[in-house]
Amino acid sequence: MNSQTTVEFYVQTNLAVPNGKEAVNTTATATVDTINNTDNTLETTLASSSSSRMGTVSRNEPQVRSKQSGIAVITELHQQFYALFKELFSAAISPEVKMVKKNYAITIVSKYILTKEQVIYPTCKMIHLESREDVNKSVEQESFLKQNLIRLDAMDVQHPEFDYFIKATFQLLINHMKHEESTLYPILAKKLGEEELETMGALIETLLDLAHEKPNPSPSVKSLTELAAVPLTTYYNQVRNLTSSRVAASRLR
């Protein structure tokens, strides 16, 4: 394969930017050499991540909800992503198995994105106004991820550029997870009580069951906000009440 073959996708690129700002996402016609540069980073990250049993996100029967915090549910998903993509990078699996794992990766990451949009981001905005910039960055990262997932969904695993493309997509996902683990989740852990975090965990598990399996669901299907209107409203009210009570208490001091 010619090392200068180009691929249309979103990739995390280290750009020279003023004032030492972070690397930025760019939409680009990137060379295969650009993707090869991510290989060592991915291998190191995958090797250092702890192994995790792969769970099933889409369930046919009602599940008993655990009393895990929302942060724990999300970070367990992060470990599942590491395990799943590590398998996708393996040259030992057949194209048929790789196709099944690719479709599952698209499903689980799509559900993850759609669920966080309804739970994590609104919560951060309600309890901590200063987190809005970090939320906006997360939303921007997810927009790139969604577009990559749409392209990945249409790509056959035997396409000559599949391996490069999925590595670029996973690098975006890694950067997104690390951003939220270092910014949004510490805010949630600090600002929410144990009860609210457990309610969030149960809600996330419910929404993972209901969320669509594609990054860009058809407008004809019900949105996640419609499918989970009651539990979402109940949770939002709980967070608002917590925030209001803390504001009132601070004024009395």
Image (cartoon, rainbow, N blue to C red):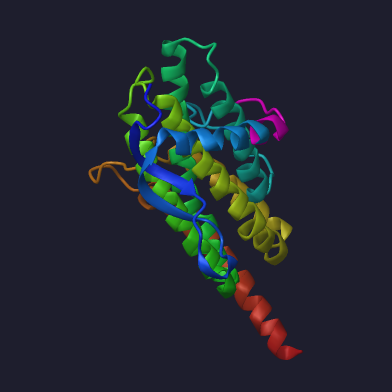
Q: Say above or below: 3 vs 224.
A: above
Q: Residue at the location (40% across, 45% down)?
A: 10
Q: Residue at the location (68% across, 28% down)?
A: 52
What x and y, as percent, mark residue 180?
60, 54
What x and y, as percent, mark residue 138?
50, 56
Q: Quadrant of the C terminus?
A: bottom right
Q: Which residues are magenta?
A: 45-54
Whether residue 175 is visible, yes or no, is: yes
Query: Which of 186 and 167 lies nearest the eye of the viewer?
Result: 167
Q: Residue at the location (63% across, 70% down)?
A: 242
Q: Which of the 4 image quarters holds residue 5?
A: top left
Q: Residue at the location (59% across, 66% down)?
A: 20
Q: Quadrant of the N terminus?
A: top left
Left or right of 182: which side holds 10?
left
Left or right of 113: which side holds 154?
left
Q: Main secondary structure of the magenta part?
A: loop
Q: Say above or below: 214 vs 61.
A: below
Residue with the most extreme bottom position = 252
Residue 231 covered by magenta stretch: no
Q: Which of the 4 image quarters holds residue 54?
A: top right
Query: Which of 180 and 129 lies nearest the eye of the viewer?
Result: 180
Residue with the most extreme right position = 253
Q: How many marks?
A: 0
What x and y, as percent, mark residue 114?
44, 47
What x and y, as percent, mark residue 188?
65, 60
Left or right of 250: which side holds 135?
left
Query: Which of 233 and 50 lies nearest the eye of the viewer?
Result: 50
Q: Say above or below: 252 vs 154.
A: below
Whether residue 199 is visible, yes or no, is: no
Residue 46 covered by magenta stretch: yes
